[in-house]
Amino acid sequence: MRIANELITARGDTVRQALAKLDKTGAGVVLLVDDYGRLLRTVTDGDLRRLLLAGWTLDSELQVLPERSSRTVPLGIDEGAALEIMTSEQIDQLPVVDAEAVRSVCSSGGNWIVGYCF
């Protein structure tokens, strides 16, 4: 289990910082959150690559990313149900949220990467 800070990133963080988190964790995703810890979107290496190809730099802040809703599930969901969603929607990570903030992330292997037990 990893601590949440390893996957959390903010709008003021740079592309370079997000790439470093992706590299360090190997999780395949970082979670862009607002000042209150609420999920704004997931960010993958592909998202960052597209920014660079569009002319942004490694020092560009993540606030330049377009808004995009991310698939989430509520805190308390059954692990089997979460994995079923991931399989049917062909996604590898699924943020678990409540009204307050991101609480954990389910990986495609069924292991909880970050956060709390259901």
Image: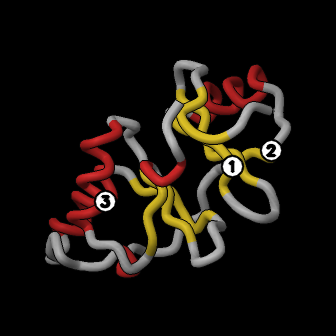
* Quadrant of the frame with the C terminus: top right
Q: How has the structure been colored for display?
A: secondary structure
Nearest to N terminus: mark 1 or mark 3: 3
Nearest to N terminus: mark 2 or mark 3: 3
The residue lying at 50 percent from left, 56 percent from top is 31
Tell me how far mark 1 sits from mark 3, CA to CA: 19 Å
Instruction: Estimate the x, y position of residue 75 in percent, counting from the top left.
Output: 80, 44
Nearest to N terminus: mark 1 or mark 2: 2
Assess whether mark 2 and mark 1 are in contact (beta carbons under 8 angstroms). yes
The residue lying at 66 percent from left, 67 percent from top is 38
Residue 75 tag number: 2
Q: Amino acid at mark 1?
A: Arg
Instruction: Estimate the x, y position of residue 41 in percent, counting from the top left.
Output: 54, 62
Res. 91 in view: no
Tell me how far mark 2 sits from mark 3, CA to CA: 25 Å
Assess whether mark 3 and mark 1 are in contact (beta carbons under 8 angstroms). no
Relative placement, left or right, of 97 versus 95 is right
Of helix, strand and loop, which one carries label 3? helix
46 and 28: which one is in front? 28
Instruction: Estimate the x, y position of residue 20 in percent, counting from the top left.
Output: 24, 53
Residue, disc 3 = 18
Instruction: Estimate the x, y position of residue 68 in percent, counting from the top left.
Output: 54, 67
Residue, disc 1 = 103
Name above or below for residue 14 compared with residue 22: below
Tell me how far mark 1 sits from mark 2, CA to CA: 7 Å
